[in-house]
Amino acid sequence: MDLAFTTQEQAFRAQCASWFGQNLPGPLASMDTPEGFEQHRAWEKRLHDAGWSAVNWPRAFGGREATLIEWLIFEEEYYRAGAPRRLNQNGLFLLAPTLLEFGTEEQKQRFLPPIASCDEIWCQGWSEPNAGSDLASLTSRATRDGSEWILNGQKTWASRGVYADWMFGLFRSDASSERHRGLSYILVPLDAPGVTVRPIAQIDSEPGFAEVFLDDVRVPVANTLGPEGDGWKIAMSTAGFERGVVLRSPGRFMATADRLLELFKERGSPAALQDDVARAWMSADAYRLATFWAVSKLMDGGTIGAEASLNKLWWSEMDLYMHETALRLLGDDATLDGPWLDGFVFSLAGPIYAGTNEIQRNIVAERVLGLPR
Ligand SMILES: Cc1cc2nc3c(=O)[nH]c(=O)nc-3n(C[C@H](O)[C@H](O)[C@H](O)COP(=O)(O)OP(=O)(O)OC[C@H]3O[C@@H](n4cnc5c(N)ncnc54)[C@H](O)[C@@H]3O)c2cc1C
């Protein structure tokens, strides 16, 4: 195995670093406030205008056709530079790869460019008040009326739902079906009559989530992604992107590990925490190497299946560990350090979103290790 980057990849990295060096904005307000939302959208537009918003997509949809390795390099430089969080991550990293795999040509042309330009923000409408880990028990339904679906039900915990324009959701489209069968993956405009979006405050009091109520909402059947009734399969593909390499690339965690090392030095390199800091940094580096290995496999035509759950366990537990270590380094000063404290609070959610870690362990036990249920 050749672990060195090619000349082309090195040039790509230099190009990314140089652009970020000249274009990075100052600190932005939280994207879950109206002011911060617009600031983040303005940043996304700047990225898009320079061709950096969706580097590995086809050019026709707003990308620059970078390879997956180059995308990983872009992510490393993005986070190394300390660039803002991505506003449209549900659209960019979850829906878009699913559209590229299962969408019709019309759907790709209609939906991908405004995701890349951030003109349309997406949220994910899967969870319901009584369907979280057991997603197949969802009850929101889609009833066919000619060329339209009539949607009814309630979704919850939709990240960015307060500001989103669209939601990709799972609905029971065959009333006689049960569990994983008879579900459809439907794209819903949130300004349609009958949609009510209510903010839910996060632990930091900002409305990072929303619950979405659907009362006789009519959407064209043409907004179904993949075959009618096949929504579970399509949703599991999205979940693979969410848990696997796409949503949480190693660049993000490597940047946190580097910041942790800096903090360790600033705090006088306390011997008692030396092993913890080293362990955190090595874990981030190992995750990075494992991801380059997985991506090389994908580029050679391989696939990632249930192993995506291993990835999710790794990044979520590592992120929490790094932030806990930082807070221990900070001691009493931890409450005064906004970035580490905010990062810690968000890292607490890592073992829950994208499917809880208990569920990922079940998947690994049954589908990777082949243990009995
Ligand atoms: C920050 C954040 C962002 C989110 N964003 C979105 C979003 O954008 N869209 C969306 O649809 N959802 C979103 N969610 C919701 C998330 O997907 C659910 O919270 C998650 O799937 C768990 O569902 P639940 O909250 O209903 O918990 P439950 O399913 O009720 O689980 C409660 C506890 O029981 C455990 N448990 C349940 N079943 C089993 C089992 N079979 N074996 C072992 N343990 C089990 C769980 O692990 C958990 O600890 C988000 C959540 C968070 C925290």
Image (spheres, rainbow, N blue to C red):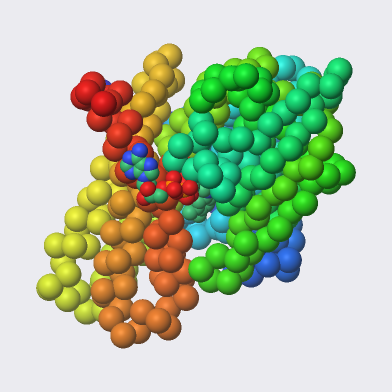
Displayed quadrant of residue 314: top left
Please tell me how many numbered marks the rendered image carries: 0
Residue 229 visible within the image: yes
Q: Position of residue 118 (x, y in %)?
A: 73, 46
In the image, what residue occupies the spot 30% across and 78% down? 330
Asked whether, in this view, residue 291 is left or right of residue 138, the answer is: left
In the image, what residue occupies the spot 62% across and 19% down? 176
Q: Quadrant of the N terminus?
A: top left
Q: Position of residue 243 (x, y in %)?
A: 43, 37
Q: Position of residue 335 (x, y in %)?
A: 40, 81
In the image, what residue occupies the spot 46% across and 37% down? 134
The answer to whether residue 41 is above or below residue 248 is below
Q: Quadrant of the C terminus?
A: top left
The answer to whether residue 211 is above or below residue 9 is below
Q: Looking at this view, is 262 or 159 the one in front?
A: 159
Residue 90 visible within the image: no
Displayed quadrant of residue 325: bottom left
Asked whether, in this view, residue 94 is left or right of residue 162, the answer is: left
Asked whether, in this view, residue 184 is left or right of residue 313, the answer is: right
Q: Looking at this view, is 148 or 349 the one in front?
A: 148
Q: Looking at this view, is 139 or 339 the one in front?
A: 139
Q: Position of residue 349 (x, y in %)?
A: 43, 56
In the image, what residue occupies the spot 61% across and 49% down? 156
Displayed quadrant of residue 141: top right
